[in-house]
Image: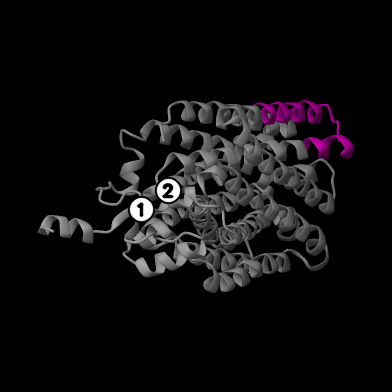
Amino acid sequence: MDAATSASAAAPRMRDISAAIDEAPWSPFQKGLLACFAAIFAVDGLANQSLGIALPALIADWNVPRTDFAPVTAANLAGVAVGSVLGGLLGDTIGRRKALIFAIFLFGLMTCASGLANDPTQLMAVRFMDGLGIGAAIPNGAALISEFTPARRRGRAIAIGMVFIPIGGILAGGLGASVLGLLGWRTMFVVAGSLPLLLGLAFLFILPESPNYLARAGKDDALNRLLRRCGITADGDEMFVAGDHGTRMATPLKALLGPDYRQQTLLIWGGFFTCLMASYTIFSWVPTLLHMLGFNLTMTSLGITTFHGGGVVGALFSGVLLDRKGFSHAHMVLAGCAAAIATLLALLLSQDVLAVAIVLPLILALGFCIAGLHNTLYTLAANTYPTSFRATGVGTASATGRLGAVLSSFTGVISLDLGGSAAFFGVVAVLLALCGVSGWTARRRSAPS
């Protein structure tokens, strides 16, 4: 045997990690990880929605106009936007596990600290920091779900994970209904922040690191142990490597706007911007809108709980629809229905149709469609970008959406002041229609995967 043949025989065969996960069964360990990420999204949604639930009580307790809280909600959403970008970059750099656990502790502590605020200025500072943690958790959680799930189940897994964001909203609504009236908004914030802190402590011992990150970091022993827990073992002289092994990669932000991904990235950003602007207009101001229309505090909490209840079902339904009909069909059906329902609410409320039996079912249906629409966008982003900058891709898309959410703090209150409930839901309807067009166009221009 000559030297060249000997060297060739000694060299390990490279096996792509993502391909190995795609080809293997979806193991109980991987499904358990999905449950962990779902729990993270639930407390993320709880912490995020806690401000909207507390707003009517804060307005009454501090005796200030609701316009004073527009900067507070804007700061919270600005923090989420900044956190989404920083969290994605941090996850792609130091590891998604570390970035995710840090984010959980940050938003847990800051949600508790919200209960110590004594005026809108203090609350604005705390909620900005809270938003940093809330935003940083989402791209890392979504990227990890995508990375640990076989491609044939990925759309459904992301749907299951994302559905727990509105479940967190349901928990916030239930917490508001049970705690807000009895113990006050300060206690509500402390309870809402304690849950993620407990979860973060548990996940210090439970959550593994991203397999592709372990491969890039050269931690082969840890990688092999992790993959064995997923039911994947190396054959003979095989060596697991990341999908971009041996290639020179641009920095994540440059890759997003490079010639291969620029069009898709800008259109995905547009879809997130309009979808989250519509979503957070509702998250932040529907309790206040219902209070303006004469509903009591318990009913305002029930209204947003109903919205999130529809969102739970809608997010799960979107996963099934994505698997069976594909992205474009699922996305456009949900966007069209959401815009139509928002338009109907605008027309009915402008005619003073305030019956609970009419308003709440429509809010439920709107939550169903918007949550499903939101999930289609996350699925699109996670499937568009490769693992080397997937967290950054999802994070910047989410951050761009949060810019729309920041504007919702002002457009929501302005539309309420200028045109009441009709203008409020009219703005939501237009945004949802634009979201449908952006996402559909992004998918049509996507590079073949």
Q: Are marks 1 and 2 in contact (CB under 8 Å)?
A: yes
| 171 versus 277 height, above or below | below
Residue under circle 1? 15
Q: Nearer the viewer, residue 221 or 367?
A: 221
Task: Say left or right for 78 vs 408.
Answer: left
Task: Say left or right for 276 vs 9.
Answer: right
Crowd around label 1: few <14 · some 14–19 · many ≥20 (10 Å): some
Circle 1 SS class: strand
Q: Quadrant of the C terminus?
A: top left
Q: Residue 438: x percent and y percent?
A: 51, 29
Q: Is residue 337 magenta?
A: yes
- The CA distance from mark 1 to mark 2 is 8 Å
| 166 versus 435 height, above or below | below
Crowd around label 2: few <14 · some 14–19 · many ≥20 (10 Å): few
Q: Of all residues shown, which one is farthest toward the left?
A: 2
Q: Residue at x 57, y 60 (%)?
A: 33
Q: Residue at x 70, y 32 (%)?
A: 425
Residue under circle 2? 19
Q: Residue at x 79, y 49 (%)?
A: 300
| 186 versus 396 height, above or below | below
Q: Is residue 47 magenta?
A: no
Q: Residue 100: x percent and y percent?
A: 50, 62
Mark 2 residue type: Ala
Q: Residue 72: x percent and y percent?
A: 59, 53
Task: Say left or right for 100 vs 410.
Answer: left
The span shown in magenta is 336-363
Instruction: Name the main secondary structure of what is drawn in magenta.
Output: helix
**Disc marking residue 57:** none
Q: Of all residues shown, which one is farthest toward the front?
A: 1
For residue 59, which quarter of the picture?
bottom right
Mark 1 residue type: Arg
Task: Say left or right for 80 vs 188.
Answer: left
